[in-house]
Amino acid sequence: MVHVALRFGERPEVAYVLPISVDGMLIVASAVMVDDKRAGRSVRWSARIAFIVGVAASVAANIAAAHSRYRILRRRSSALGQRVRSPCGACLIVCAEA
């Protein structure tokens, strides 16, 4: 994910923190879902959404890294980079506040 963010023009300090934010979001969402299930509550929608968005961001970054040799991706690199990184911070906040 760092390689993808750097290639799409992200600042290095942000690119190196991006995987931590995505993985952190997945860890927090998983912990919240497990806690809700153990307490006998229904799983919060915010935790489910954060988990789904985190998985989607991770998969999108892996696909972008794997297909970096294609011209189509290079032409759309800034748009793809925005799509991969933009929801991560918001979902981490939603999941942590839930």
Image (cartoon, grey):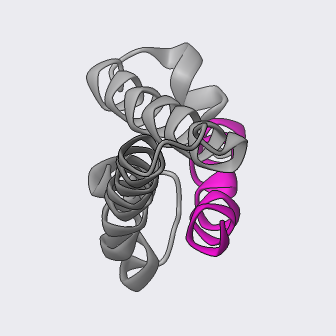
Q: Which residue is outermost to the bottom?
A: 13
From the viewer's perspective, tell me whether residue 64 is left or right of residue 82: left
Taking the image as shown, residue 91 lies to the left or right of residue 70, namely right
Q: Is residue 87 left or right of residue 64?
A: right
Q: Nearer the viewer, residue 76 or 60?
A: 60
Question: Residue 11's x, y, as percent?
Answer: 48, 78
Q: x and y percent of residue 52 in the render?
A: 55, 32
Span highlighted in magenta in the image: 79-98
> With respect to residue 2, does 97 lie above or below?
below
* Viewer-closest of 73 and 20: 20
Where residue 58 appears, as percent x and y from the top left, is 39, 37
Locate residue 36, reporting x and y percent: 48, 49
78, above or below 27, in the image: above
Q: Is residue 95 inside the magenta stretch?
A: yes
Query: Is 60 rendered above or below residue 26?
Result: above
Q: Quadrant of residue 89?
A: bottom right
Q: Count every numbered label the image shows and give the total.
A: 0
Q: Residue at x 57, y 44 (%)?
A: 41
The quadrant of the picture occupied by the C terminus is: bottom right
Q: Main secondary structure of the magenta part?
A: helix
Q: Quadrant of residue 22?
A: bottom left
Along the line of sight, the residue nearer the viewer: 69 or 13: 13
Question: Who is closer to the viewer here, 73 or 35?
Answer: 35
Q: As drawn, which residue projects farthest toward the front?
A: 40
Q: Residue at x 53, y 62 (%)?
A: 9
Q: Which residue is rendered at x = 58% and y = 48% of the image?
A: 47
Residue at 32% in and 56% down = 27
Magenta stretch encompasses residue 33: no
Image: 5 above or below 21: above
